[in-house]
Every structure is written in C-alpha cells, then in structure tokens.
Amino acid sequence: MTIILGILTEGLVYAILSLGVYITYKILDFPDLSVDGTFPLGAAVTVSIIMKGFSPLLAIVIATLIGVLFGVITGIIHVKFRIRDLISGIIVMTALYSINLRIAGRANVPLFSKETLFDNDFLKSLSIGYYTDVILLLFIVIIFKIILDFYLKTKSGLLLRAVGDNEVLVTSLAKNKGNVKILGLAIANGFAALAGSIYCQLNGFFEISMGTGTVVIGLANVIIGISIAKHIKLKATTCVVIGSIIYKACVSLAISLGLVASDLKLITAGLLFLILAISGIKKRGVKNDRA
Amino acid sequence: MKTLKTLNKLATLGLILALTACGSESVTKNSHKNTSEVIKIGIGQFAEHGSLDNCREGFIQGLAESGFREGENLEIIYENAGADIGTATQIADNFIAKNVNLICAITTPMAQVSYNEAKKTDIPVVYTAITNPVAAELADKDGNSTGNITGTSDRLPIEEQLKMIKKIMPDVKKIGILYCTSEVNSEMSIKEYKERAKELGVEIVEQAVTSQADIPLALDNILTKVDCLNNITDNTVVNSLDIMLDKARKAGKPVFGSEIEQVKKGCVASMGLDYIALGKETGKMAAKVLRGEKANSMKFKIFNDSKLYGNEKAAKEFNLSLPEGFEEVGR
C-alpha cells in the first residue's frame, strides 16, 4: 500500500507540472525547456518565504506568480527577440540556476521545522493519517485540472489551441499569435512553479538539483497521457494526470525489481518504451483535441 | 483495423493493471515475511561515488562486528538514487513499503527524504556522510536529533590538511579550490577553509562551477592563479578528478586530495577521513538502534579521525617529499 501511496503522491505532484507541459508541448507545439528552471524556482521561492515565517499558502501563490513571470520572459525572448524556442528555454533555464540559488540562499534548505501545506496543525487535527498527502494532492490536482479545462474552453483558451494548430487562422482573426504564445508559456511555467512549490513542501526541503530532468519527466507524462487518450474516452488533461502516475509507477517498479542501481534509468526507459510501443503512437500531427 | 485498435486498447489497460498489480503484490508478500527473525534494513545511497561506496561497505562491516551478518540474520536491500531527488524519494517509499527495520541513508538529500518519508512510520533512520546535520535540520544545535533519526557526520579535518600542505610545500601562497555551487557541503567547507587559511597565512582561491561540463575551463583558469590545488569532498569535482590531475600535471601544479580514494588515483597527499571507519562507526550505531535503543535519544557523532595518506610517485613528479609517517596508498 505504501508503494502505491508513494506512486500516487509523486505522480500527482508531477501531474501539476505535466498539465503545464501539456499546454506548451501539445497545444502550442513549443518544446519549453524553461520548466527545468521554473520547477525548482517554485521550490526556492517557497522555502525562502516559509523560512521568513509566512504562511505556506502565501508561498504557493507567490511561487506560482513568479513562475508565470519567468514564463513570460521565455515568451518575450522567443517572440519579441525572435530567438528559437529551444534556445529561449535554455536561456531562461540557465539563468534560473543562479537565480534559484540566490533566492534560496544555499543549495539545500530544509523545511522540517516549519509548517507546510502537508505538515501543519490543521491537518493533524483532522487525523486522516496516512492518506492525508494523497487526498490533499488529489484535491489540488483536480481543482487545477478543472480550471485548466474551463480555461481552454474560453475565448482566450480556444485562441491558444488555435495557435498550435493553425497559426494563419489566428493571424487572419486579427489576433497577435506572439502574445498568445507568451500567455501559454506563462500559464505553463506557473503550473511548473506551483508543482515545485508543492513538491518541496511535500519532501520537506529544497535542493538545487531537484529541477534536473523535469522537462523529460513532464514530456514523458504528457506523451503517455496522450497515447492513452487515444484509447480511453477521457479528457486529454485527465489522461495527462494518469500518465504522470504511470510514469512514476514505472520508476517504482524498476526500483522494486531490485535491480542494480546504475541500471535503474535503463529499466525505466525500457518500461516507458514498452507502454508507448503497445499503445502505439501513430503518426505525429494527428492532434487530439478532446481537451 | 478496428480489431487492431481494440487489441491496443486492451493491451494498454492490461499493462496498467499489471503495473498496479505488481505494486500491491510486493506489499502483501512483504508484510508476511516480517514475522521471521531476519532483520531487514534498507541502505539508500544518493549517488555512485568511491567514498560513499566505502561508507556503505564500512556500515555493513560495522553491523557484522555487532552481530548482524548479511545472509545470516540480516537482509540488506541496497538502492542507489543516481543523484536524483525523485528517485531518492521513491527509494525511501519502497523501503517503507517493504517494512524494513531500519533505513541507512548515505548523504544529506538521501537522509532528508528518508526522514520525511519515515516520519509517518516508526522506522528509524541512521545517516552517514553528512557534513552538517544541524544545517540539514536533522539535529538541533546541541546535537540532539529532531526525530527518529541519528547518524554520523564527516567533518573535514581542514586545519590538519592546510598544515600538511604547508609542510610539503613550505613556500605555498595560494591554494586553489574548485567547487560546485549546487553542493551545500562544499560551501560550508570553503568558508571554513578561508578562515583557517587566514590564520596560517595562506590564501584560498576559490573557483565555482555549476556542473561537470564547466570543470575543464574552470581548471584552465584557476591553474594560472595558484601554487597548488586542493580538493574538498565536492562530488561533482571529485568525479572529474582524472581531468583535474591531467591538467594540473601539465601545468606543474600538485593536487591535494580530501580522502584516500583521491590519493590512490594520483593526488599527492591528503589528511583524509577513512570512510570505511566512518561507515563502521555508523554500522555500530545502527546495531544499537536495532537492539532497541531509541534513535531520537542518540546524539549524532562527528567523525574526524584523520590520517595522512600519501602517493610517493605523484609527489616525486613535482619534486616534493612527503612528511614522515604517511601511509603509502599510491599504485
């Protein structure tokens, strides 16, 4: 049971991030590397605010907003300065490494002695015990998933989807596609920072290296999610959440198979390949627009 | 075509089910096993690294000396996180799911995740290879543990190291240290180095890198400014020791190590901690915990028994002579 709870908690945290990656990668067709920086950014902002004695909720809000800000920066670098998508992400990600260190103060900041979202008197008084983390996370993920679903149906959300599908259409509607891209990146990085904020509160500490590989995990989650969405009649965002949990289940399975440590990544990769091969990703370009 | 699609659909679902089933199966199996007399411990190591491996070996030896022998009355589950926090968390979860009697966490992040995950259970955590447990919030200022956790700290013998360098190179003025900004231990070591160096009248020239990829350029830069290089226990830098030794040799500047493994590889000398001994000490603490002593009432131990390790061949290359009484570890 503990393993499943562990998979769910880890999976759900990364689901928040994946919802963001879904916007950039799948909807905007923009491979956004800046999440490698904004995920730990969310954590860095959170620890520095909590260490100063403010409430964890305030920390989450500010972390998310600062994530949004850096999403906008990536967008501006790409749109206004006409720098390629990958490079804009790399620029912001690289800069954020130093910024994160500055914000957090040092490379590893523990939160064990502070109240966090997952460790506070209110939750203890509810005494749900073991399932607290998962229930809380599920609640958060569902809320943000619903907000995102709702947003994608608004006029602005539809425009966002149009930019990924057909840029010419957006221009012919007399809308600036650049601004729409910036908006999308802002939302995506807001999600990434939110996930980082929640992740460090869950783990009880910030570590500068926690961002390494975030993009890869996010992309894997989204791709697994999308390939499931082809077979199951569920919203793409829901599938992305499920995808995140499956990814973490793969890692966990690789660990519990008791393999040599150095082979862990290989096994994870193998399991991922297996899932994708079986669910058969068809030709790219077939967009899944059930969102 | 349609049958193919249905097939795919079934396969996907099957796989998902298989994954979940695997998870639950291992849980039920393990809850049964726990009734036997064999004690089960999980060793979580954050990264692949010579001194950390020595810690682990020493830990197992220390347990054996206290009567817990692998294969007889002890089962060891060893996992390595490959320097990834997410994996480390899942490793800790996995130990808890397997209902181990104790978790041994090697390095700071591993200890922090294990502590955080094990908080919900009564599984004790024993850590090792942590430079500053107080800064990691695993112990308070007086050394008392903050929860069901205790262990050993590997504070570097910095003063001894500097004195040793001065003895081997009496004219030394500037000592270069390379470190990675992502390693919290390194930052603390550098600070202490600077303080001690001032007392001894030498200058520390620091050079920060952010990843392994920066190291060659950083070396080219720092080697023009210093009389010798000195390593701290910075994992990123130590992992690039070969290139450091190579570049330093070409520049005619000796390199001093921070532990025995580095001297074996070609550093001139080191006042080093014996990580096997550190592990052993930790193993003995773990044995006490397994016998029923409460981890939260045990203060963490600072381990600073240092010994002079030297590499004669490396020293000769730079026309240096090693002080009396060193242990030759060069190959």
Image (spheres, coloured by chain):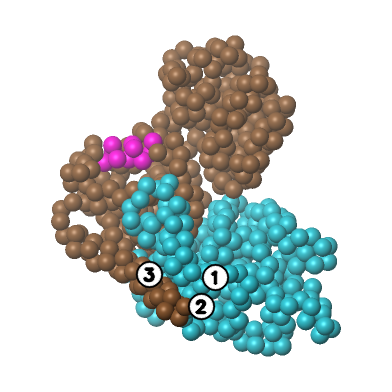
Chain colours: A cyan, B brown
Of labels 3 and 1, the one closer to you: 1
Indicate the amino acid at tag 3: Leu
For the residue carrying disc 3, how many other residues have a C-alpha within 10 Å: few (<14), some (14-19), or many (20+)?
Answer: some
Indicate the amino acid at tag 2: Lys
The location of residue B299, given as percent across then percent down, is 37, 47
For the residue carrying disc 1, how many other residues have a C-alpha within 10 Å: few (<14), some (14-19), or many (20+)?
Answer: few
Which label's residue is closer to the chain start, 2 or 1? 2
Residue drawn at 62 percent across, 21 percent down: B249
Helix, strand or loop at label 3? It is helix
CB-based contact (under 8 Å), mark 3 and mark 1: no
Of labels 2 and 1, the one closer to you: 1
Question: To which residue does mark 1 refer?
Answer: A282
The CA span between labels 3 and 1 is 19 Å
Q: Is residue B202 left or right of residue B2?
A: right
In the image, is residue A51 above or below residue A157?
above
Q: For this rendering, which residue is in front, A95 or B275?
A: A95
User: Principal SS element in the magenta part?
Assistant: helix
For the residue carrying disc 2, how many other residues have a C-alpha within 10 Å: few (<14), some (14-19), or many (20+)?
Answer: many
Question: To which residue does mark 2 refer?
Answer: A230
- Where are the magenta residues, as a range? B54-63
In the image, is residue A248 above or below residue A139?
above
Helix, strand or loop at label 2? It is loop
Tell me the number on the disc at residue B313: none
The location of residue B16, given as percent across then percent down, is 39, 71
The location of residue B231, given as percent across then percent down, is 57, 32
Q: Are marks 3 and 1 on the same chain?
A: no
Quarter of the image for the C terminus of chain B: give it. top left
Residue A117 visible here = no
Q: For this rendering, which residue is in front, A197 or A8?
A: A8
* Host chain of mark 3: B
Question: To which residue does mark 3 refer?
Answer: B15
